[in-house]
Image (spheres, rainbow, N blue to C red):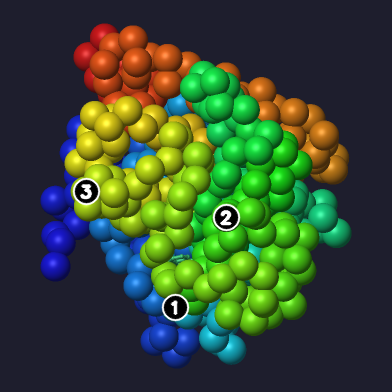
Amino acid sequence: MTDALQLVDEWGPEKIVVVSHRRTGMRGVLVIDNTARGIGKGGTRMAPSVTVPEVARLARNMTWKWAAVDLFYGGAKAGIIADPSAADKEAVLRAFARALHNEVPSEYVFGLDMGLTEQDAAIIQDELGDRGTAVGTPAELGGLAYDQLGVTGFGVAEAAEAGAAMLDLPLSGARVAIQGYGAVGKAAAQRFHQLGATIVAVSTAHGGRYDPAGLDVATLSAASAEYGDAFVNRIDIGSPLAAGKELLADCEILVPAAVQDVIDEDIAQAVQPRLIVEGANLPTSPNAQAILAKRGIPVIPDFVANAGGVIAAAFAMDARHSGFRPDTTDMFRTIAEKLRANAQTVLTAATRDQLTPHQAGRRLAEERVHAAMRGKGRLPG
Ligand SMILES: NC(=O)C1=CN([C@@H]2O[C@H](COP(=O)(O)OP(=O)(O)OC[C@H]3O[C@@H](n4cnc5c(N)ncnc54)[C@H](OP(=O)(O)O)[C@@H]3O)[C@@H](O)[C@H]2O)C=CC1
Ligand SMILES: O=C(O)CCC(=O)C(=O)O
């Protein structure tokens, strides 16, 4: 078992709060990584496998994400050990929110990650109050329903198009394989399709579907709405794909959009795309990143490609304070502009300075966080 103190390095975490509640069985953790650029902001994950080190890694990734996209919040993430499909989800969520009432909203604001939906954000807000305690709430509450709007997947496809252009790879006709068909994967598939790409493989934890000639995105999305993530075993388009095989599908663009640590050294040696775009957080290990760089396969890092969620969260935070409905047109335009520019900046710096794209993006983010730490007197001037 990891000693929480061993997680602390020069950047953070600044605070780790472990909470539990006997009657509901709730167990969870909030990790506030680095607040030099602003209060802790990041989504809340619910899964039976959540661990403190996992949430700490995700919180650190949020520090880089906010800095890379140049918005003034700090890295944080929360995690609850629970099955999101269990009947007592609401009671567990309410207990988790209550247990963090000291930290929310002055140090942390709840948001969406795997296992949480807009309805859950509404429940948290009901438990803790309306004044900026959670983002990702439904539109009827004046919120910005960013998973339903598909902001993160939209941004992933926008970043992909900008990165692909640098490889002289037009998105029109490019074959795309996507792991994960939740909020991020589904919206990415829809945006890639709008941009002219062909979706050849999709998957959930239940398995996948593959068709070299292209899967019909409208059929996939309708089936996922009807059957949930087991839809991959209920539709008869394409052929079935064993779990994990979607990463090895013949394609030009590979999008891991599910869980962390799926692209290890073996997968990095075996995959054949021309570009990888990280929709998930932390899908590629550092050794795998190095192998891919050596093989000439650029990777648009998670903290660059999937920053649509944080841009939406920033719009939602503004709206909570002003009382106005968030401007979704402006939000989508901002996501496209920022993520396209950032993808190209990071890939250009990586090529120029012979770094992996993660190293190049980290350098940019670290410089900004360091400057803020110096500005606040946390580091010698
Ligand atoms: N939501 C957001 O705004 C943001 C999310 N992210 C990241 O994107 C990723 C996905 O999040 P999100 O879409 O919100 O989560 P969801 O819970 O909406 O969906 C997760 C999807 O991944 C699938 N999945 C889980 N494990 C595997 C696996 N081993 N192989 C294939 N598919 C799998 C799930 O299938 P099943 O249901 O069958 O388990 C489901 O389809 C996470 O890494 C998250 O941190 C990043 C930025 C913002
Ligand atoms: O900050 C949020 O509320 C959503 C974004 C997020 O959690 C992420 O980018 O991983």
120, 133: nearer the viewer? 120
Residue beneath the point at 75% across and 66% down: 219
Q: Mark 2 and mark 3: span between their CA atoms?
A: 26 Å
Circles 2, 3 touching at the beta carbon (< 8 Å): no
Callout 2 crowding tier (Cα within 10 Å): few <14, some 14–19, many ≥20? some
| Horizontal relation, residue 206 to residue 270: left or right | right
The residue type indicated by label 1 comes to Ala
Q: Check the picture and name the quadrant holding the N terminus.
A: bottom left
Rendered location of residue 3, percent (x, y): 14, 60
For disc 3, the marked residue is 265
151, 98: nearer the viewer? 151
For disc 1, the marked residue is 82
For disc 2, the marked residue is 212
Callout 3 crowding tier (Cα within 10 Å): few <14, some 14–19, many ≥20? some
**Among the two numbered marks 1 and 3 on one chain, the one whose residue lies closer to the N terminus:** 1
Rendered location of residue 341, percent (x, y): 57, 19
Query: Which mark lies nearer to you, 1 or 2?
Result: 2
**Given the current orientation, which residue lies at the most extreme front position?**
213
Q: Does residue 193 show up?
A: yes
| Horizontal relation, residue 254 to residue 358: left or right | right
Query: Which mark lies nearer to you, 2 or 3?
Result: 2
**Among the two numbered marks 1 and 2 on one chain, the one whose residue lies closer to the N terminus:** 1
| Horizontal relation, residue 7 to residue 312: left or right | left
